[in-house]
Amino acid sequence: MLKGLYIALVAPFKDNGSLNDAKLTEIIKFHASAGTDGLVPCATTSESPTLSREEQDRMIEISVKHSPEGMKIVAGCGTNSTARSIENIRRAADLGADAAMAATPYYNKPTQEGLYAHFRKLADEGGLPLMLYNVPGRTGVNLEPATVERLCDHENIVALKEASGKLEQVSEVIARCGNRIDLLSGDDAITLPILSAGGKGVVSVVGNIIPKVMLKLISLFNEGEQAKALELHVKLLPLCQAMFLETNPVPVKEALNMLGKEVGEVRLPLVGLSQDNKKRLKKALTDFGLLD
């Protein structure tokens, strides 16, 4: 159900720090023209912990309103409260989202049994197809392959964004679940290896800047052009790495601003990119041919 290129959207802010609806609309139309398969508003790259409920709703509403037919909207809805996550999913459904994404609950660090019960309840009561999101570096807990296998037969659990960085774990999930769940890369830098292991796409940060290139990487792989896909993967690697010079989405927002997209600053407690890392980012953009 959820295959191809999904963009983890940045949240553009005005100079006064408020959500920039007009800029968000512009960004969505940019991805629509590129042929992007789907958008993920209100996830980490959208600085979701700092968004008000009203802003979350507006991001989803604007994404739905301005996305063309066929482009899926997967709303970031997960929190470390099961009840609040269900509320978010239901609101996203009411706003017209196609699916919801929920990360493993952070800080409270549930056991595998707790994760299973949490995601089952979201799938049972949320009312949308669900993309699980495993990002232990952010949440402090790893969604293990055996738990994914227990969940993947639920009719509403359709995808997994896997950002553990562990290719062995990716391979084990695919070996256990097969086609019962669509596994997407949560790390741009290893999208090609994950596709090679059986992944179906990527939820991308760098795609905010170069959606057509990421679409090309996926299409080359799917068309059996392995040598060309590898060549593009190698070319992409320094730019993907530059997106994580500091905490996401600090570098990608800085990159978009360098490219004239004017998406504004990050919100506290995040701060702007350091001067040294700005130089590294500018070099990566220049080397890739995005800046003179």
Image (spheres, rainbow, N blue to C red):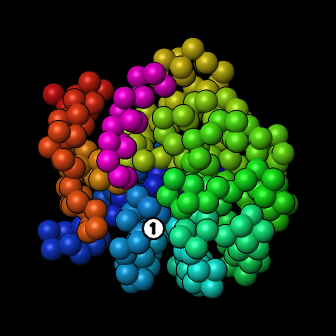
Amino acid type indicated by mark 1? Cys
Q: Residue at x 68, y 57 (%)?
A: 143
Please give the name of the residue rendered at 14% of the width and 68% of the height, measured from the top-left corner. Answer: 15
Residue at (82, 65) in percent of width and height? 154
Q: Which residues are magenta?
A: 233-248
Please say whether residue 215 is visible from this viewpoint. yes
Q: Is residue 217 above or below residue 208?
A: above
- As drawn, the residue found furthest toward the top would be 227
Q: Please tell me in which quadrant of the rendered image residue 160 appears.
A: bottom right
Q: In the image, is 91 to the left or to the right of 292?
A: right
Tag 1 secondary structure = loop
Report the residue at 42% width, 44% height from top. Answer: 207
Q: Position of residue 14 (x, y in %)?
A: 19, 69
Which x, y percent locates residue 131?
Answer: 65, 61
Is residue 174 within the magenta segment?
no
Q: Is residue 128 left or right of residue 140?
A: right
**Would you name the residue on which mark 1 appears?**
42
Residue 276 drawn at (x, y percent) = 17, 39
Q: Is residue 290 above or below residue 75?
A: above
The answer to whether residue 29 shows anywhere in this view is no
Please name the predominant secondary structure of the magenta segment in the image.
Answer: helix
18 or 283, nearer to the observer: 283
- The foreground one among 243 and 116 is 116
Pinpoint residue 85: horizontal percent, then vertical percent: 59, 78
Q: Specify the quadrant that holds the C terminus.
A: top left
Q: Which quadrant of the structure image shows residue 63?
A: bottom left
Dot 1 alpha-carbon crowd within 10 angstroms: few under 14, some 14 to 19, many 20 or more = many
